[in-house]
Image (tube, rainbow, N blue to C red):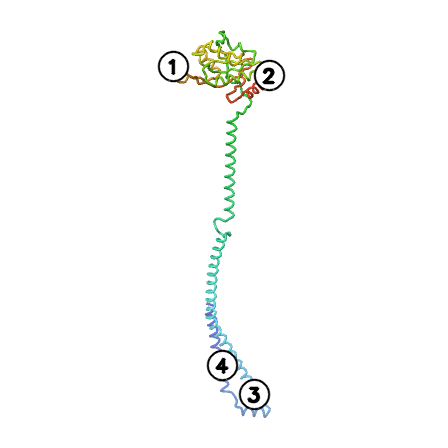
């Protein structure tokens, strides 16, 4: 729009200038004096005619120069405008090409950066975030594995050794009983009061476990006497009342230790004492009169008041059994 207005203004100026030039040329042709008149006027000293003539010519020449300048500027405007349009289009094309090349270069640069392992701005995941994610995952796996191993070690420790803690009360082990001693006399729990005693439940036809446990008990009794000076009474209670008669029990206990007391009784009496001391026993398959009795393999340490103190399983040897009993006796004295 602005270029159209400029072209229109320049055309109007050129038209007005052409009209002025035509008028001035007509005036010049009509009133221009001849050279003879000019020479006569100069000869007589009249300079007004030559002066007007020169001023008119100068004005006309100036108007012609203006016309040439206007025409040249208008022509240059008209010629420069398409050139400028072309140059603009060329520059825009160049810019587009350069932009395309830059974009292509940018794409190639991005590809090169991705190939070289550099971060790409605007990407969803960077190498730093990937590294942090990997480090966090590795830390969680390490922590879980360590806690799992620690938990397994705690379970193993607890299963191997039972932790001793403060007692919340007395164990419901022990109670009154009425049985027959191996010499034929009736005895109760009161006959054992006043002395420390260790009770073991078994049967005389036991092939291996009962003899091994009674040998261990007899050896521990002697060592306890040596270490603490305390006489501990060993007691054997039969869980096979059908075969273990008084005479059978007497002959059996004397094979292990002279102080070992053997007790037996009726099936109901044995069942009652076994229930009081939480002892398990049961017959296995019978073949005629030969059978075995499955039972608990436990020794019970009883105080002089016939109160339960502690039990010792098969895993204790002579030394550990001796040390354990001596320790309990010393704590009891305190």
Residue 261 in the image: x percent, y percent?
51, 11
Residue 292 in the image: x percent, y percent?
43, 17
**Residue furthest toward the front?**
255
Q: CA distance from mark 1 to mark 2?
A: 46 Å
**Residue furthest toward the right?**
334
Q: Which mark identifies residue 21? A: 4
Residues packed near mark 4 inside 10 Å, few (<14), some (14 to 19) or many (20 plus): some
Q: Which label's residue is closer to the chain start, 4 or 3?
A: 4
According to the picture, the residue beneath numbered tag 3 turns out to be 50
Q: Which label's residue is closer to the chain start, 1 or 3?
A: 3
Q: CA distance from mark 1 to mark 4?
A: 161 Å
According to the picture, the residue beneath numbered tag 2 turns out to be 226
**Do tag 3 and tag 2 residues touch (Cβ < 8 Å)?**
no
Q: Nearer the viewer, residue 73 or 101?
A: 101
Q: CA distance from mark 2 to mark 4?
A: 156 Å
**Foreground label between 3 and 2:** 2
Q: Residue at x 49, y 76 (%)?
A: 72
Q: Which label's residue is closer to the chain start, 3 or 2?
A: 3
Q: Which label's residue is closer to the chain start, 1 or 2?
A: 2
**Foreground label between 2 and 4:** 2
The quadrant in which the C terminus is found is top right
Q: Which mark identifies residue 66? A: none
Secondary structure beneath label 3: helix
Q: CA distance from mark 1 to mark 3?
A: 178 Å
**Foreground label between 1 and 3:** 1
According to the picture, the residue beneath numbered tag 1 turns out to be 288
Q: CA distance from mark 3 to mark 2?
A: 168 Å
Above or below 70: residue 122? above
């Amino acid at each position: 729009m602005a270029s159209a207005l400029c072209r229109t203004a320049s055309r109007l100026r050129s038209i007005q200038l052409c009209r002025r030039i035509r008028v001035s040329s007509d005036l010049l042709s009509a009133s221009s004096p001849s050279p003879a008149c000019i020479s006569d006027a100069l000869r007589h000293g009249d300079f007004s005619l030559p002066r007007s003539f020169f001023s008119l010519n100068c004005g006309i020449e100036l108007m012609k120069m203006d016309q040439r300048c206007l025409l040249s500027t208008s022509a240059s405007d008209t010629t420069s405008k398409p050139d400028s349009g072309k140059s603009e289009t060329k520059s825009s094309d160049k810019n587009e090409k350069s932009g395309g090349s830059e974009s292509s270069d940018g794409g190639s640069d991005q590809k090169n950066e991705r190939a070289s392992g550099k971060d790409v701005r605007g990407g969803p995941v960077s190498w730093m975030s990937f590294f942090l994610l990997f480090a966090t995952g590795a830390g969680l796996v390490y922590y879980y594995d360590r806690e799992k191993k620690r938990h397994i070690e705690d379970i193993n420790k607890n299963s191997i050794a039972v932790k001793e803690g403060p007692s919340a009360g007395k164990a419901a082990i022990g109670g009154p009983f009425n049985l027959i001693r191996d010499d034929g006399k009736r005895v109760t729990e009161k006959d054992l009061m006043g002395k420390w005693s260790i009770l073991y439940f078994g049967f005389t036809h036991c092939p291996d476990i009962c003899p091994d446990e009674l040998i261990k008990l007899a050896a521990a009794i002697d060592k306890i006497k040596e270490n603490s000076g305390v006489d501990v009474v060993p007691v054997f209670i039969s869980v096979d009342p059908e075969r273990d008669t008084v005479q059978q029990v007497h002959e059996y206990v004397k094979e292990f230790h002279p102080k070992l007391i053997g007790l037996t009784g009726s099936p109901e009496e044995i069942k009652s004492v076994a229930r009081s001391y939480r002892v398990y026993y049961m017959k296995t398959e019978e073949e005629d009169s030969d059978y075995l009795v499955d039972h608990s393999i436990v020794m019970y340490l009883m105080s002089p008041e016939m109160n339960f103190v502690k039990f010792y399983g098969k895993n204790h040897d002579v030394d550990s059994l001796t040390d354990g009993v001596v320790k309990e006796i010393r704590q009891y004295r305190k």
